[in-house]
């Protein structure tokens, strides 16, 4: 039995893939540990996976709603995330990961867990990187849609090469605390930018998104394996919520389902009223997945839930409206239903662009959402069968894609090859 340690940082969308792969490894007879913020202990342990605490803790960073709004700022969000949420906690993260990795055989990183390669080096352990969305590859041949610079996408590889080089210089300036930590630990300097090329492993890089979203490009790093999305639905189902869901679904036509994941829900003050109004004007029923702040005085035919497993509600929808978090998008693609995507920031606009290119979705930037725009974009999704047909075809293609098992098998293979090489 081998011991695999995953580390991750961010929202539930970052945590759930780790849990899914850890469960697959456990079922294969191995030991898997998810090392992350103490705030997620209950999520991990309720899934039957071992947990190890790694700072920082989200609750110690202040009000979560305020943090989300700063991270989702189109222009300053990436800087806030790296400079104010990742870099100030490097030594604590390193120390915690050193403890969590004791007795381990293989370490698995997340794009923001920048101390994991240092821990692997200190312990002499192999490590594998995970890539959650195509944006992380920053390919000039399949250029990502950058939320703050949507116009850039119209230009060719030359301008993207220049823009990515400039961005690299900017990010490098944010990462000086990491260079200082390397010096404190007696490690040799590195010219890599941790959040960019430094996130990739020389051993294996597991792309945890579905192959329909992006194909390998000449400038992807070496040793990339596209596994498909590891699917995990979250906490155990609330029986009363599931009973309410079944009663609502049985009472009428398939509803429009509006969902904003676990983070973008904190941006939804105006979104839920717009969603409600749009559904009413279209004469459609609706389900709102709002998180803990359930709206009051909803009209007949509109039902709000704090949480529902996406696999239980998305396939029952007429249309799925969501923000294109990569995990939410993976669930929506498997549901075989048309999508209206309202991306907020970070990788979401690029994820939305890939889905739209498949012919299964239409998009509205989140900050441009109104009831009028929702009605305008939902009408063709509700009435034109081409969206349904393409969505069903994609779902059929994904029916046999088990991203969690593929990733688990790849990790076991990597460990075996590393052992043979030694």
Image (tube, rainbow, N blue to C red):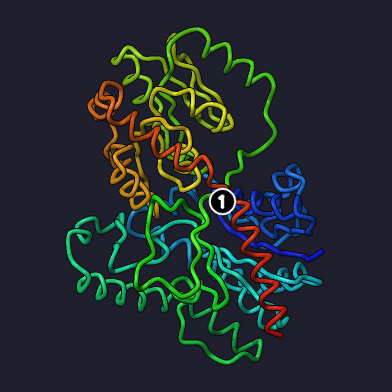
Q: Is residue 17 above or below residue 275?
A: below
Going 43% across and 32% down the picture, which residue do you hit?
A: 336
Choose between 293 and 224: the one closer to the eye.
Answer: 224
The quarter of the rendered structure image containing the N terminus is bottom right
Left-right relation of 253 to 61: left
Q: Is residue 265 visible?
A: no
Residue at point 66%, 82% (across, down) = 121
Towards the viewer: 390 or 182: 390
Give the answer, above or below, for where 84 lies relative to 262.
below
The residue to which callout 1 is attached is 403
As helix, strand or loop, the secondary structure at mark 1 comes to helix
Provide residue 20's location: percent of width, then percent of height.
64, 49
Residue shown at 67%/56% (left/top)? 37
Can you say which quadrant of the picture contains the C terminus?
Answer: bottom right
* Residue 337: x %, y % from top left: 40, 30
The x, y position of residue 4, in whole percent, is 72, 64
Give coordinates of residue 274: x percent, y percent.
Answer: 34, 25
């Amino acid at each position: 039995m081998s011991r695999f340690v995953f580390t991750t940082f961010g929202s539930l969308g970052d945590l759930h893939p780790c849990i899914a792969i850890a469960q697959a490894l456990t079922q294969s007879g191995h030991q898997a540990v998810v090392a992350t913020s103490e705030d997620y202990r209950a999520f991990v342990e309720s899934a039957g996976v071992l947990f190890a605490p790694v700072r920082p803790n989200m609750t110690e960073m202040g009000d979560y709603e305020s943090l989300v709004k700063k991270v989702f700022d189109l222009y300053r969000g990436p800087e806030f995330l790296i400079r104010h949420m990742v870099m100030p906690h490097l030594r604590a993260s390193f120390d915690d990961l050193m403890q969590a990795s004791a007795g381990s055989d293989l370490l698995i990183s997340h794009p923001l867990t920048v101390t994991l390669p240092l821990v692997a080096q200190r312990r002499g352990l192999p490590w594998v990187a995970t890539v959650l969305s195509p944006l992380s590859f920053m390919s000039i041949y399949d250029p990502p849609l950058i939320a703050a610079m949507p116009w850039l996408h119209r230009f060719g590889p030359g301008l993207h090469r220049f823009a990515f080089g400039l961005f690299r210089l900017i990010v490098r300036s944010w990462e000086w605390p990491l260079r200082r930590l390397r010096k404190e630990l007696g490690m040799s300097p590195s010219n890599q930018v941790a959040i960019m090329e430094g996130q990739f492993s020389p051993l294996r890089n597991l792309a945890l998104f579905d192959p329909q979203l992006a194909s390998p490009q000449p400038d992807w790093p070496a040793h990339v394996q596209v596994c498909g999305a590891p699917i995990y639905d979250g906490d155990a189902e609330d029986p009363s919520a599931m009973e309410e869901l079944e009663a609502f679904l049985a009472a009428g036509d398939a509803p429009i389902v509006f969902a904003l994941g676990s983070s973008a829900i904190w941006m939804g003050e105006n979104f839920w009223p717009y969603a409600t109004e749009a559904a009413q004007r279209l004469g459609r029923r609706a389900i709102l997945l709002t998180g803990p702040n359930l709206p009051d005085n909803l009209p007949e035919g509109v039902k709000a839930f704090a949480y529902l497993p996406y696999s239980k509600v998305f396939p029952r929808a007429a249309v799925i409206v969501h923000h294109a978090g990569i995990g939410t998008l993976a669930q929506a693609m498997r549901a075989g239903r048309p999508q209206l995507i309202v991306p907020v920031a970070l990788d979401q606009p690029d994820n939305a662009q890939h889905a739209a290119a498949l012919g299964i979705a239409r998009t509205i930037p989140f900050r441009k959402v109104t009831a009028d725009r929702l009605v305008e974009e939902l009408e063709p999704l509700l009435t034109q069968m081409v969206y349904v047909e393409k969505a069903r075809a994609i779902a059929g293609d994904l029916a046999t894609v088990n991203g969690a098992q593929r990733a688990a098998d790849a990790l076991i293979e990597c460990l075996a090859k590393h052992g043979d090489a030694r």
